C-alpha cells in the first residue's frame, strides 16, 4: 500500500437524470402536464450531465465583469459573461423555460415549464433572467400595444445575446428594476421620477439599488409619474440603435448567485414607455411579482432536491466503521428527514404550478387558492432551504465543505430565494392581508386542505389549530410567522396525504404535524419507513 492510494472515495454525481424524481413526475401527471414527460426527462438528462455541471462551475468561478467604458473613453455600460453562462442560457431559452408557456395553448403548459425549470439546475444564477422574462409577459399585457410588439420575441425560443434594437433580434429577455436604496421592499417609497414627453414616451430620472441581469433587452420598472407610481418598460437600446441612458454604476458583490450580474443603475433621462395606467404601478407589476415568487418556490424545492441526492449519493458509496453510511441508523434518519422535506416542497411547488396554469386560463377558484397558497409557500419553502442545504452539506463531512463538492455554492445560494421578491416578513404580512381582505381566498385554501380531512388524525388536529389561528385576531401581526408556518405545514401535509408516497406522508405528519421531531434534521421518530423514503432520493448514475 502506498501513501497516495485513493480509495473509499465517492464517484462523481454526473450522468444522471435530474428529472428522475417520483414527486416531480407524479405531480406532472396530476397537474395536467403528463404530455411533457419526455421533454422534462430530456432536460433532466442535460442538467445531470457532466458538461452542464462543469458549465455551472465555470460560470461561478468566472463571474460577470462590468465594462463602463471602451478603450477610447466612450460610455458602453456592458457586462461580460463567461462562455459557460451563455451555454446555460442557450439551453434554458431553447427549451422554453423563459416564457414559452405564454405562447402555448395546451393545458398544463405552465406546469411543464415549472417541472423543466426544476430539472435544469446546473447553476441557479442564470435562472434569474429566465424567471424575470417568464414573469414579464402578463405585466406587459396591461398595455396591449406593447405586448403585441414585444411578446412574440419574449416567447421565442432563440437566445440572441447582445445590445441591439429589440425589434431587430430573434429573441428577447426581460428584467425588472424595482428596489431603491431608501425603500427596499417598500416600493411605494420610490423616488425615481417619470417626466412625460409630447410623443407619449417618458423620461426617467432616478437610482435603482438592485437591477438583476442588467444585460437583458427590456426592463420593467417603477417611477413616480404625474398621476402617481407607475410601471414602465425601459429598453437597453432604443429603436434607432442608440443606447438608452440607463447607466450601470457597479455590480453587487453578493454572497451567492455569483454567475448572475446584479447592478446598481441610474436613469439619466432614460426613455420609457408606460405600462398600464398612471398611478397603478403596483397593481400592474403584481402579476410579475407573483410569477417570480412561484419561481422562488420552484428554485428552493429544486435546491433541496439537489442537496438530497448529493447527500444520498455520497452516503450510498462512502464506507465508515465497516458499513456504508447509508446503512448507519443515524445517517438513515438524517437522509430520510431531508427526503421528507424535499418531497413536501416539491408536491407544494407542483400544486402551485397547476394553480398558476389554471388561473392563467381563467379559473377563478384556482386564482383565489393561488393568492394565499403562493404567499404561504414562498415564505415557508424558501425559509427551509438554508437549513436543508447546511444539513446536506454536513452529510459529506469535510468533503462537503470543500468547493469541489458543489455544496458550498448550493449553500450560498440558499438564502436568496427567501429574500428575493419579499423577505420572510413581507411574505408573512402579505398572507395576513389576504386573510383580512379577501375571504374568498381563505375559503379556497380551506377547501384545499379539508379535502384531506379524516385521512390522518395528526393532520386533522393541525387543521383545527389553523382554524383557531385564523379566528384569533389578537396580536396577529406579531404572530404572523407562526401562523403562516402552520398554514404551510397543513397545506403540505394535506397534499402529501392525498397524493404523496404513504411512507413520506406518514413521516411528515408524525414529525411536522404530530410534534415528534427535534429542532434539527435527523430527528424523525422510530417506526418511520426509512428504507422506502431514502430509496426515492438516491440518484441513478450512469
Image: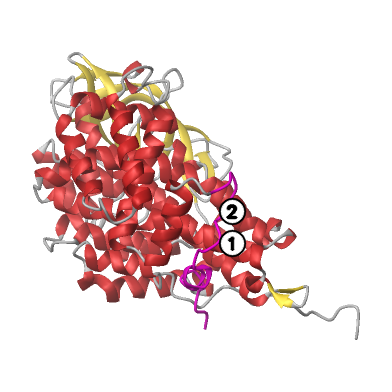
Question: Where residue 457 appears, x then y in whole percent?
Answer: 34, 51
Q: Position of residue 6 (x, y in %)?
A: 79, 79
In the image, 176 versus 184, the foreground residue is 184
Left-right relation of 39 to 256: left
> For this view, does 260 lie left or right of residue 40?
right
For the residue pair 69 and 102, the one nearer the viewer reads as 102
Between 80 and 442, the one nearer to me in the picture: 442
In the drawing, what numbered circle is on residue 523? 2
Label 2 sits on a secondary structure element that is loop
Q: Can residue 386 be seen in this snapshot?
A: yes
Q: Is residue 129 visible?
A: no
Q: Residue at x 33, y 34 (%)?
A: 244
Q: How is the image coloured?
A: secondary structure
Is 102 rendered above or below residue 119? above
Name the residue furthest right. 2
CA neighbours of label 2 inside 10 A, class few (<14), some (14 to 19), many (20+)? some
Type of secondary structure dominating the magenta stretch = loop
**Cα distance, mark 1 to mark 2?**
7 Å
> Is the residue 183 above or below the residue 121 in the image?
above
Quadrant into which the N terminus falls: bottom right
Question: Taking 136 as reference, is 104 left or right?
Answer: left
Label ID, residue 333: 1
In the image shown, does 157 or 266 lie closer to the viewer? 157
189 inside magenta stretch: no
Percent x, y for residue 28?
Answer: 27, 66
Percent position (x, y) of residue 284? 19, 31
Residue contact at pointers 1 and 2, CB within 8 angstroms: yes
Write the start and end of the magenta stretch as one range. 517-542
- Place residue 369 in its image quadrant: top left
- Residue 34: assigned label: none
Establish if 321 lies above or below 192. below
Amino acid at each position: 500500500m502506498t501513501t497516495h492510494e485513493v480509495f473509499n472515495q465517492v464517484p462523481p454525481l454526473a450522468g444522471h437524470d435530474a428529472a428522475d424524481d417520483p414527486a416531480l413526475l407524479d405531480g406532472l401527471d396530476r397537474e395536467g402536464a403528463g404530455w411533457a414527460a419526455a421533454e422534462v426527462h430530456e432536460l433532466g438528462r442535460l442538467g445531470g450531465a457532466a458538461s452542464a455541471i462543469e458549465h455551472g462551475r465555470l460560470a461561478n468561478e468566472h463571474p460577470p465583469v462590468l465594462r463602463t467604458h471602451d478603450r477610447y473613453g466612450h460610455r458602453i455600460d456592458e457586462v461580460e459573461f463567461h462562455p459557460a453562462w451563455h451555454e446555460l442560457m442557450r439551453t434554458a431559452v431553447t427549451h422554453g423555460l423563459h416564457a414559452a408557456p405564454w405562447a402555448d395553448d395546451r393545458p398544463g403548459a405552465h406546469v411543464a415549464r415549472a417541472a423543466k425549470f426544476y430539472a435544469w439546475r446546473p447553476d441557479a444564477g442564470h435562472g434569474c433572467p429566465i424567471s424575470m422574462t417568464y414573469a414579464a409577459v402578463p405585466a406587459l399585457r396591461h398595455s396591449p400595444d406593447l405586448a403585441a410588439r414585444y411578446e412574440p420575441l419574449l416567447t421565442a425560443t432563440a437566445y440572441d445575446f447582445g445590445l441591439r434594437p429589440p425589434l431587430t433580434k430573434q429573441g428577447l429577455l426581460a428584467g425588472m428594476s424595482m428596489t431603491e436604496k431608501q425603500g427596499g421592499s417598500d416600493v411605494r417609497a420610490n423616488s425615481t421620477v417619470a417626466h412625460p414627453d409630447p410623443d407619449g414616451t417618458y423620461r426617467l430620472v432616478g437610482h435603482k439599488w438592485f437591477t438583476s441581469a442588467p444585460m437583458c433587452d427590456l426592463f420593467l420598472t417603477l417611477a413616480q409619474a404625474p398621476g402617481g407610481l407607475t410601471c414602465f418598460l425601459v429598453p437597453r437600446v432604443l429603436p434607432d440603435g442608440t443606447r438608452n441612458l440607463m447607466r450601470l454604476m457597479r455590480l453587487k458583490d453578493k454572497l451567492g448567485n455569483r454567475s448572475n450580474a446584479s447592478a446598481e443603475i441610474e436613469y439619466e433621462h432614460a426613455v420609457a414607455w408606460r405600462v398600464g395606467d398612471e398611478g397603478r404601478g403596483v397593481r400592474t407589476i403584481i402579476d410579475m411579482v407573483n410569477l417570480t415568487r412561484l419561481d422562488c418556490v420552484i428554485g428552493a424545492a429544486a435546491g433541496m432536491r439537489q442537496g438530497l441526492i448529493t447527500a444520498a449519493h455520497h452516503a450510498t458509496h462512502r464506507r465508515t466503521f465497516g458499513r456504508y453510511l447509508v446503512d448507519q441508523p443515524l445517517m438513515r434518519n438524517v437522509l430520510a428527514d431531508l427526503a421528507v422535506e424535499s418531497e413536501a416542497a416539491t408536491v407544494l411547488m407542483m400544486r402551485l404550478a397547476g394553480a398558476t396554469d389554471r388561473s392563467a386560463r381563467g379559473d377563478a377558484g384556482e386564482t383565489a387558492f393561488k393568492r394565499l397558497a403562493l404567499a404561504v409557500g414562498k415564505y415557508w419553502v424558501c425559509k427551509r432551504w438554508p437549513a436543508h442545504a447546511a444539513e446536506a452539506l454536513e452529510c459529506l463531512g469535510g468533503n462537503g465543505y470543500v468547493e469541489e463538492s458543489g455544496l458550498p455554492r448550493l449553500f450560498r445560494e440558499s438564502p436568496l430565494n427567501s429574500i428575493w421578491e419579499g423577505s420572510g416578513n413581507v411574505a408573512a404580512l402579505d398572507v395576513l392581508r389576504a386573510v383580512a381582505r379577501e375571504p374568498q381566498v381563505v375559503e379556497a385554501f380551506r377547501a384545499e386542505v379539508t379535502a384531506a380531512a379524516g385521512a390522518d388524525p395528526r393532520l386533522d388536529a393541525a387543521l383545527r389549530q389553523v382554524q383557531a389561528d385564523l379566528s384569533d385576531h389578537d396580536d396577529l401581526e406579531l404572530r404572523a410567522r407562526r401562523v403562516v408556518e402552520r398554514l404551510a405545514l397543513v397545506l403540505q401535509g394535506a397534499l402529501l396525504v392525498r397524493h404523496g408516497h404513504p411512507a413520506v406522508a406518514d413521516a411528515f405528519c408524525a414529525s411536522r404535524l404530530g410534534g415528534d421531531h427535534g429542532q434539527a434534521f435527523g430527528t424523525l421518530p422510530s417506526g418511520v419507513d426509512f428504507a422506502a423514503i431514502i430509496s426515492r432520493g438516491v440518484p441513478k448514475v450512469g
